[in-house]
Image (cartoon, rainbow, N blue to C red):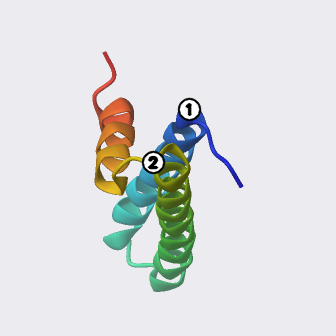
Amino acid sequence: MAHTFEELVEKQRGADQAHATTQALRTKGDPAAYEAAWHVWRGLAQDVQGAVTVHAKEQGVMRAGVELEVKKAVRHPE
């Protein structure tokens, strides 16, 4: 399935938010909640990676460049 750059950015935002939740639960002393959050984060991260790969192939550009631009758009908005 084709993804626009904006969709990739939204997917990355979701993965980053899930990662932050996972990190916050890491020290809370609730292993079950941490593990559940970790699985959600990993699923979202894998989805982002797959979508970036497909997008790069469809655009005929290097995957690493797409990933870098997506992360830059999410983590360092202008």
Q: Residue furthest front?
A: 60
Amino acid type, label 2: Gly
Q: Number of numbered discs present? A: 2
Residue at point 56% right, 77% down? 36
Residue visible at 51% across and 69% down in the picture: 46
Q: Residue at x 34, y 63 (%)?
A: 23
Q: Nearer the viewer, mark 1 or mark 2?
A: 2
Depicted 6 relative to depicted 34: above or below: above
Q: Which amino acid, mark 1? A: Glu
- Is residue 6 left or right of 19 when viewed as pictured? right
Q: Quadrant of residue 6?
A: top right
Which of the pair 77/68 is nearer the observer?
Answer: 68
Percent position of residue 14, x then y: 54, 48
Label 2: few (<14), some or many (≥20) within 10 Å? few
Q: Which residue is mark 2?
A: 60
**Please, what secondary structure does the residue beneath circle 1 have?**
helix
Query: In which quadrant of the rendered image does the N terminus lie?
Result: bottom right
Q: What SS does tag 2 mark?
A: loop
Q: What residue does disc 1 label?
A: 6
Front-most of residues 52 and 47: 52
Residue sticking out furthest to the right = 1
Which part of the image, by quadrant, shows the C terminus? Answer: top left
Residue shown at 47% from the left, 74% from the top:
38
CA distance for labels 1 and 2:
18 Å
Q: Residues within 10 Å of mark 1 (few under 14, many from 20)?
A: few
Q: Quadrant of residue 47?
A: bottom right
CB within 8 Å, label 1 to label 2:
no
Position in image of residue 24 (x %, y %): 37, 60
Question: Is 43 situated left or right of 13 in this image?
Answer: right
62 and 44: which is toward the camera? 62
Residue 72: x %, y % from top left: 30, 35
